[in-house]
Image: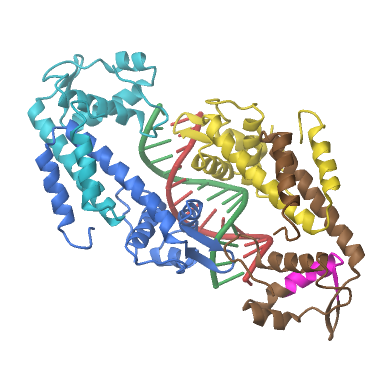
Chain colours: A blue, B cyan, C brown, D yellow, E red, F green
Amino acid sequence: MITLNYQSGMPIYQQIKNKILEEIMLGILKADEQLPTVRTLARELGINPNTIQKAYQELEGEGVIYSLTGKGSFIQNVGVAGQKILKERLEAVTKALEEAKMAGATRPEIDTLVTAVYDKGGNAK
Amino acid sequence: MITLNYQSGMPIYQQIKNKILEEIMLGILKADEQLPTVRTLARELGINPNTIQKAYQELEGEGVIYSLTGKGSFIQNVGVAGQKILKERLEAVTKALEEAKMAGATRPEIDTLVTAVYDKGGNAK
Amino acid sequence: MITLNYQSGMPIYQQIKNKILEEIMLGILKADEQLPTVRTLARELGINPNTIQKAYQELEGEGVIYSLTGKGSFIQNVGVAGQKILKERLEAVTKALEEAKMAGATRPEIDTLVTAVYDKGGNAK
Amino acid sequence: MITLNYQSGMPIYQQIKNKILEEIMLGILKADEQLPTVRTLARELGINPNTIQKAYQELEGEGVIYSLTGKGSFIQNVGVAGQKILKERLEAVTKALEEAKMAGATRPEIDTLVTAVYDKGGNAK
DNA sequence: GTGGTCTAGACCACA
DNA sequence: GTGGTCTAGACCACA
């Protein structure tokens, strides 16, 4: 179930990519599981199939899914993709931390945030 | 002295905004101090005046600077602007943390990052 | 015994063609020997009969097998087909070599590859 | 100067990618040199700008070029990209060699091909 | 002007 | 039916 945000400024195909990555990370989508077809998902979301196609093709280029013409699109072996995603996100945290520090954030303030996120229970979003 | 990175993917006007915000946070630019004019800065950086214009306009919209027609652009009272910037950056950290957690980042991994950033000394960038 | 690789990107009908060509080259399939029927092979491999049909039709078009309506498909006189296949594959090697050379591959690098392939013993795959 | 082959079956965007990779490999295109704009190249080749866009975006995703909105597209630092391309092409040679061997190609036949390619002079295509 | 996103719709190879 | 390619054309952010 993907809900699109047309006001956020984030491209639709990006939102779709993120949602799929998220579901892989959370174990909702598992290796070799089939994704909705390009056309089906496009119909469901009320958008153009080309936009789904773009999302799927980028994910395939990144080794996250694989596509079989005439069959459909499937989740790739999760391990490799997952490690890459984790690494990217840790780098994003570091960058955000540096900017916050520059704006005057203190160590205790940051620690409070970290604790808040890690005590929220399983689902972080 | 602003150095632009054309290959980082970050829009030029954003880099300019960030640099000014940074200098305010670090106390280099102080309240009511005058910024270089749009044309002067454009010439210095070898870029289109429209780009500087956009950076200044957004900073004015965010209450960070104020413009006096025919006089130039000036740093707003720092306290107010600073608190808003800090708040935004702490929110960015929270968002980055949530995404990292979802990708499998553990609490100790995050703590290591935080310590790394806060033990680097004064200049975080 | 054909094993299909759904993730290699190579079309299924191509994999079937290649496997048959390979078995002819290796002398496993001999002249006038009967191939499994389209339906039998489709059932065995768990794929669509159309896919087998396409593989057989192309092989027939290339003079590698011949079909007798109501009887089945048979291996063509091996000599003729084999020479054509060999010629095609040598052309493929030339093309690959030219592209590698253009990308900076040196003669010794190529010689190393050739030796590696030809010293591996009977089974090259 | 790119000439397209509409009969080859190779997608147009692939042909464009290959041509650019080739020119980088041959040193015709150098680091930070600007490529023709999406629209210009589309007009020149008589094809849709979207097709050029796709070629450029894939090259950017592969780290071969970088694009600056409002400025144009440029050749990335060549070293890294070049090594990746070379490695891929050597693997293609190995695969072609294995298939040729399986079809009965002898070592001397292969050596003849290699010599033919490497004695043709600078321009292999 | 330049790259990036998206829609609408056609046509193809493959299964 | 399914993914892949391509055209035509609109609109956007950025420079």
As drawn, B113 above or below C38: above
Q: Residue C61 lies in magenta, yes or no? A: yes
Instruction: Give the answer, above or below, for where A100 lies relative to B105.
Output: above
Q: How many callouts does the rendering have?
A: 0
- Kindly give the residue lying farthest to the bottom in the view shown: C70
Residue under the point 19% across and 27% down: B121
* Front residue of D78 and D90: D90
In the figure, residue D53 lies in which quadrant? top right
Quick check: is D54 in the magenta stretch? Answer: no
Q: At which x and y percent is residue C23? A: 78, 68
Q: Position of residue D85 (x, y in %)?
A: 60, 40
Majority secondary structure in the magenta region: helix
Which residue is located at x 26 percent, y 29 percent? B125
Image quadrant for the C terminus of chain A? bottom left
B58, C17: nearer the viewer: C17
Using residue D99 as the reference point, say whether residue D47 is left or right of it. Answer: left
Task: Indicate whether A55 appears above or below F2.
Answer: above
Question: x, y (%) of residue C86?
Answer: 84, 56
**Which quarter of the figure has residue A96?**
top left
Name the quarter where the N terminus of chain A is drawn.
bottom left
Q: Can residue D65 be seen in this view?
A: yes
**Could you tell me if residue D9 is visible in this image?**
no
Where's residue C120, x and y in %?
Answer: 72, 54
Q: Is residue E8 left or right of residue C80?
A: left
Query: What's the magenta region?
Result: C53-66
| Residue at horizontal 12 percent and vertical 18 percent from the top | B32
Question: Which of C52/D35 is in front?
Answer: C52
